[in-house]
Image: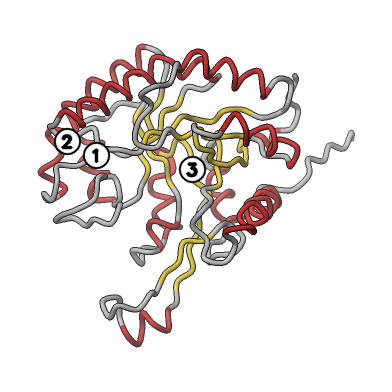
Amino acid sequence: MENINNLNDIRIGVIVGADNALKVIPQLIPYGFESFEITFGSSCEGYDLREYGKHVQEIIGENDCVISCLGLYSDPLSETAEGEAVIKCWENLIDNVDAFGSNIIAGFTGRLADMPVDKSIGRYKTVFGELAKRAEDKGVKIAFENCDCGGNWNRGGVNIAFCERAWEMMFDVLPNENIGLQWEPCHHMVQLVDPIPQLKRWVNKIICLHGKDATIDWNIVNSRGISCGETFAWHRTPGFGDSNWTNIISILRMNGFKGSIDIEGFHDPVYKGELEYTGQVYALNYLKKCKGGEFVKIEL
């Protein structure tokens, strides 16, 4: 299908779990989702990826939507049998992502347990140096999500790719062009980081995005601080949070970004339960407006 709509240089999609993607994707396509990230959670063991990819492509058929990436959100840096199993899953996804019509694998970097971020850099270089080479040979890109997973610089979490200081270290030891970020504003907003200046600095390392926003209660932050045990930030579905997505998408466009923004649901404190997909479809239509609305062509 010839695509004359260059608004689709940036597609608005949604994340679906691999366990129910074959059931959910056909129900979501009629609402106009333009891409789907299929996430395998912590493991892709037990999946025949080539056969699964074939079924996914049959569902998509002639519809104007794509599989943006495959996701794996677990810890490949752990020097355990579990960590080695995660590495095998990364290899399996890299080898078979083409069966889904995609060339991007997204996920966490992993982390040495309860150690400062910089202590994981050597292990990160070893593991992802090999995975990046394997991916490069197959034309595949690796995108690291920017979630802190409940950790900070000194301890916790299963991901070191949550702040600029870590990115500087990561991309210094592995400057490979096929390694970058799966960025979203939410994870920085809840750290009280302004995502817009950060986006401008790092836009050329962004491979794909998650569509997730946040709401910050600055009255609590300014009067009570962030250590008083009161909630001061909420993860939100786009359209219900504080981010200016028109600005975000404009920055992406001005820097030549082409790719997908996949809505990450099941976090919003209001649009949840029976309202979950109402919120996700609202976010889809909101983000489509933020990227310019309907394509218009006038002959002059």
Residue 43 location in percent, x, y?
A: 35, 31
- Say which amino acid is labelled 2: Ser
Q: Are marks 1 and 2 in contact (CB under 8 Å)?
A: yes
Q: Is residue 255 above or below residue 53?
A: below
- The spot of residue 104 in percent (x, y) is 45, 27
Label 2 and label 3: CA atoms lie apart by 26 Å
Residue type at mark 1? Gly
**Element type at mark 3:** strand
Residue 137 percent across, percent down from the top left: 35, 12
The residue under label 3 is 209
Distance of mark 1 from mark 2, alpha carbons? 7 Å
**Residue 13 position by quadrant:** top right
Lateral position of residue 290 relative to residue 69, left or right:
right
State the residue position of label 2: 78
Quarter of the view holding residue 139: top left
Q: In this view, does 210 lie to the left or right of 130?
A: right
- The earlier-in-sequence mark between 3 and 1 is 1
Q: Kindly identify the residue that appears in the image at 39 percent across and 14 percent down.
A: 95
- Of labels 2 and 3, the one closer to you: 2
Looking at the image, is 98 positioned above or below residue 143?
A: above
Q: How many labels does the image show?
A: 3
Q: What element carries label 1?
A: loop
Q: Which of marks 3 and 1 is in front?
A: 1
Residue on which the image places disc 1? 110
At a point 52% along the width and 19% down the height, the residue shown is: 52
